[in-house]
Image (cartoon, rainbow, N blue to C red):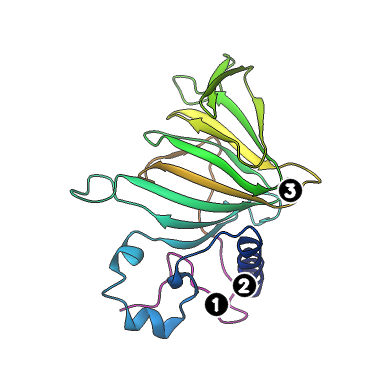
Amino acid sequence: MKRSEINLLQMEAVAFFRERQFHLPPWACWGAADWQKNRQEAREVIDHKLGWDLTDFGLGDFYRCGLLLFTLRNGKVGERGGKDYAEKVMIVRENQVTPWHFHFHKMEDIINRGGGELVIELCNATGDEQLAETPVIVQVDGVSRELAAKGRVVLRPGESITLPPRLYHQFYGASGRGLVLVGEVSRVNDDEKDNRFLEQIGRFPEIEADEAPLYYLCHEYPVD
């Protein structure tokens, strides 16, 4: 992706957050000088890779298969005395897919915080980590619901779903409903070891530096 495209997506995100009255922490908009000045005080942000995140899953087509998110808080697996929880906010576009995956250990609540409608497809995992044909039972706002394999739940603003470990899911914004502001509250998030995608994919996009970053992504803070 071009950096200019990422910058536009971040500007769009800030405007959408403001429209939905969702406020980011001050460091969300820091520039290079701010990160250098506060590099010791902001070690938790830097070391835990909080902040802006964007992926095209290595497929090179962000608008078809991609996700923009902002990690607000997170711990580290096995860290004594640290946070044992995480929180993210995401913007999901119409028909923009986050593909089939589950988490080995993380349980999470996915919440529609406003905007459009979020479609989540669900499937149990087989012993060899493929898609099972068995019925799925999930909690939607604390109420049990049974679905067929690959069944769908549509979350409207204010609704949420609990996803336990090893439950395959993929999601996207409903067509014609606009951007969706999605929240995630979970156990500690570990993208390096805890994610199992059904198909092999990438993580961070290759970035063409056609202009300077508007806001740094979580893996590129300019600190010593």
Whether the magenta-drawn stretch holds residue 212 is answered as yes
- Reading the image, the residue beneath label 3 is 94
CA gap, disc 3 to disc 1?
26 Å
Find numbered disc 1 in the image and state the secondary structure of the residue it sits on.
loop
Instruction: Assess disc 3: are there few (<14), some (14-19) or many (≥20) residues with their C-alpha within 10 Å of its C-alpha.
Output: many
Q: Residue at x 43, y 72 (%)?
A: 27
> What secondary structure characterizes most of the magenta part?
loop
Q: Residue at x 60, y 81 (%)?
A: 211
CA gap, disc 2 to disc 3?
20 Å
- Reading the image, the residue beneath label 2 is 7
83 versus 46 height, above or below? above
Cβ atoms at labels 1 and 2 below 8 Å apart:
yes
Find numbered disc 2 in the image and state the secondary structure of the residue it sits on.
helix
* Residue 192 visible somewhere in the drawing: no
Q: Residue at x 56, y 52 (%)?
A: 90
Quadrant housing residue 199: top right
Q: Is residue 121 left or right of residue 24?
A: right
Q: Which residues are magenta?
A: 205-224
Give the amino acid at mark 2: Asn
Give the amino acid at mark 3: Glu
Cβ atoms at labels 3 and 1 below 8 Å apart:
no
Q: Residue furthest right?
A: 176
